C-alpha cells in the first residue's frame, strides 16, 4: 500500500480506548513521526532499487589555467591524437575509387537515360564488400533519404556517391578546422580563422597571383565575412558547426578550381578580383593616405549620395579611432550595404536607424532620416517628395505587427528591408525607387529595340 494512503487513514481513524482524547499538538507530533517513518522507508526503498544513482557520471572538465603549462600541453597532444584517429577513420582516395567500382558493378537495370541506378538488395551487398569505413553510409535511412520517384524502388548511384563524398569532405573540413581550435571548445576565434585561411592560400590556385604583401589584407577581408554574418552578437568567436553549415567555406574552397569563370570570380567575395576591388575602393577613398577613413572620405562611397545624417550615425555607432574608420570597420560597412536583403545586414543598418535605441522605428525616426533625403533633393534641384506619402508607403510595404512601430523582425519578415533602408539613407537609391516604373518601361523599350535589330 502507498505510504501516503497509510498516513491518511491513520490520521482520520478516531481515537478509541481508555486514553483521553489527544491534544492538537500531540496529533501534529504523531503526524510528523508517521510522515518521517513512511518517507524514510519509501526513500530507502528507492535507493536500494536504483543503485546507479550513487555514481553520477562526470560531465564537467575544468580547462587548464594559463600557468598550468604541463596540463595544457597534455590536452593539446591528446586532442591532436584524437583528431588524427578521426582522420584515419575517413575514406581516402583509393577507398573512394573502390567504392565507385563496387557501385558501378552492382547497378540495377534499366538505366534512366545515362544515370545508373541501384536497388536496396544490391545496395546492401555493396555495403558488405566496401569495408568497415563505409558501414555508416549503407543504412536504410540513407537509402530512404535518396529514394525519390523511381518506379523500381532504386536510387541514383551518382547521387549516393556524391552524398558520401560530401560527408567525407565535411568530416575532413571539421577535423581541419578543429586543428586551429586552440581552446578546444568547438569554436574559432578571429585569430584562429585568420591562421586557417592564411595557411589555406597556397592550396587555392585562383589566389596564385596575389602578392605576399597583400596576404594580410586578403585574410582580413575573408575573415570579416565569416564574422559579420556568423557572429551577430559580436562575441569574437564562431562555432565550427556554423562555419560548416553556411556556404562561405564552399565559396572559399571553390577557388581550388583552376578554370573558375570570370563571372564566378566577380560574384565570389573570396576571389582575388573581389578582394582587390574592395581594398582598392578603400585606398581610393583614403585621400590623405593615413590608412583610415574620415566621415568626409567615406561620403564618397558608391554613388556619393548617402546622407550626412546616416554617415553621422555610422561614426557614432561603429568602432572608430580618433573619429576615423579602419579597414576592418569599413569591411563591415561594405558587407552590410552590399547584402541588404540578409538579416545580419539589416540588423547592422537597423541599429543605425534606431536613433532612440528603442528597438523599433517610429514616425519620428523615419522623418529624421528622410528629411536629409529631402534636403539633398533641393540641393540637386529636385522637387522634394512629401514625407507623409513616403511614410505611408513604408508602412504599407513592411506591414508591421504594431501599426505605429517597425521592428527589425518586421523588416526581415516583409522581404522589403533592403528597399526601406535604401529609401532612408541614399538619395540615388530613393530616386531609383521613386522612378522604378519609368525605369522598367525604359528597359522594356531598349529590349524591344535590340530585338528589332
Image (cartoon, grey):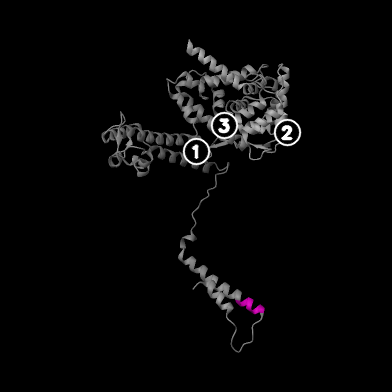
How far apart in space, not on screen, are marks 3 and 2 (Cα)?
A: 25 Å
Say above or below: 78 vs 452: below
How far apart in space, not on screen, are marks 3 and 1 (Cα)?
A: 20 Å
Crowd class of label 2 (few under 14; some 14 to 19; many from 20; radius 10 Å): few
Pair 2/1: label in front: 2
Position of 409 with respect to 309 (left or right) is: left
Position of 75 with respect to 400 (left or right) is: left
Pointer 3 or 2: first along the chain: 3
| Magenta stretch: dominant secondary structure | helix
Q: Report if residue 79 lies within the magenta region.
A: no
In the picture of the structure, the residue carrying the numbered disc 2 is 364
* Residue 322 in sight from this viewpoint: no
x, y percentage for residue 171? 43, 37
Q: Residue at x 59, y 75 (%)?
A: 33
Say above or below: 46 vs 165: below
Q: Which residue is drawn at 45% across and 26% down?
A: 254
96 vs 110, nearest the viewer: 110
Where are the magenta residues, as a range? 24-30
x, y percentage for residue 139? 35, 43
Crowd class of label 3 (few under 14; some 14 to 19; many from 20; radius 10 Å): some
Q: Report if residue 28 lies within the magenta region.
A: yes
In the picture of the structure, the residue carrying the numbered disc 1 is 241
Q: Which residue is drawn at 59% across and 34% down?
A: 414
- Marks 3 and 2 in Cβ contact (< 8 Å): no
Amino acid at each position: 500500500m502507498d505510504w501516503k494512503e497509510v498516513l491518511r487513514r491513520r490520521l482520520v481513524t478516531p481515537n478509541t480506548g481508555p486514553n483521553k482524547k489527544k491534544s492538537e499538538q500531540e496529533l501534529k507530533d504523531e503526524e510528523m513521526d508517521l510522515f518521517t517513518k513512511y518517507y524514510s522507508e519509501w526513500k530507502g526503498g528507492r535507493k536500494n532499487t536504483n543503485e546507479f544513482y550513487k555514481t553520477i557520471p562526470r560531465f564537467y572538465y575544468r580547462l587548464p589555467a594559463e600557468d598550468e603549462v604541463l596540463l595544457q600541453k597534455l590536452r593539446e597532444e591528446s586532442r591532436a591524437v584524437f583528431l588524427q584517429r578521426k582522420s584515419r577513420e575517413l575514406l581516402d582516395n583509393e577507398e573512394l575509387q573502390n567504392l565507385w567500382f563496387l557501385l558501378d558493378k552492382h547497378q540495377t537495370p534499366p538505366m534512366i537515360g545515362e544515370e545508373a541506378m541501384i536497388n536496396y538488395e544490391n545496395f546492401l551487398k555493396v555495403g558488405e564488400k566496401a569495408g568497415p569505413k563505409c558501414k555508416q553510409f549503407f543504412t536504410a535511412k540513407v537509402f530512404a533519404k535518396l529514394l525519390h520517384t523511381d518506379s523500381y524502388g532504386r536510387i541514383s548511384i551518382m547521387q549516393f556517391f556524391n552524398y558520401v563524398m560530401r560527408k567525407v569532405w565535411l568530416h575532413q573540413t571539421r577535423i581541419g578546422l578543429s586543428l586551429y581550435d586552440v581552446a578546444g571548445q568547438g569554436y574559432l576565434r578571429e585569430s584562429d580563422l585568420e591562421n586557417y585561411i592564411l595557411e589555406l592560400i597556397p592550396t587555392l590556385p585562383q589566389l596564385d597571383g596575389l602578392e605576399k604583401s597583400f596576404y594580410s589584407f586578403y585574410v582580413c577581408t575573408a575573415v570579416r565575412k565569416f564574422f559579420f554574418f556568423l557572429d551577430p552578437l559580436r562575441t569574437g568567436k564562431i562555432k565550427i558547426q556554423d562555419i560548416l553549415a553556411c556556404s562561405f567555406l564552399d565559396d572559399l574552397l571553390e577557388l581550388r578550381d583552376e578554370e573558375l569563370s570570370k563571372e564566378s570570380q566577380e560574384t565570389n567575395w573570396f576571389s582575388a578580383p573581389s578582394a582587390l576591388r574592395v581594398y582598392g575602393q578603400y585606398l581610393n577613398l583614403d585621400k590623405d593616405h593615413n590608412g583610415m577613413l574620415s566621415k568626409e572620405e567615406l561620403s564618397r562611397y558608391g554613388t556619393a549620395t548617402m546622407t550626412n545624417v546616416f554617415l553621422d550615425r555610422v561614426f557614432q555607432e561603429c568602432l572608430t579611432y580618433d573619429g576615423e574608420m579602419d579597414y576592418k570597420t569599413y569591411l563591415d560597412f561594405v558587407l552590410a550595404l552590399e547584402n541588404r536583403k540578409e538579416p545580419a545586414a539589416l540588423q547592422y543598418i537597423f541599429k543605425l536607424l534606431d536613433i532612440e535605441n528603442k528597438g523599433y522605428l517610429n514616425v519620428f525616426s523615419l522623418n529624421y532620416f528622410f528629411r536629409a533625403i529631402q534636403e539633398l533633393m533641393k540641393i540637386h534641384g529636385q522637387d522634394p517628395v512629401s514625407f507623409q506619402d513616403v511614410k505611408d508607403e513604408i508602412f504599407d510595404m513592411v506591414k508591421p505587427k504594431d501599426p505605429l512601430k517597425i521592428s527589425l523582425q518586421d523588416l526581415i519578415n516583409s522581404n522589403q528591408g533592403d528597399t526601406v533602408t535604401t529609401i532612408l539613407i541614399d538619395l540615388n537609391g530613393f530616386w531609383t525607387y521613386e522612378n522604378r516604373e519609368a525605369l522598367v518601361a525604359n528597359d522594356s523599350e531598349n529590349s524591344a529595340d535590340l530585338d528589332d535589330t
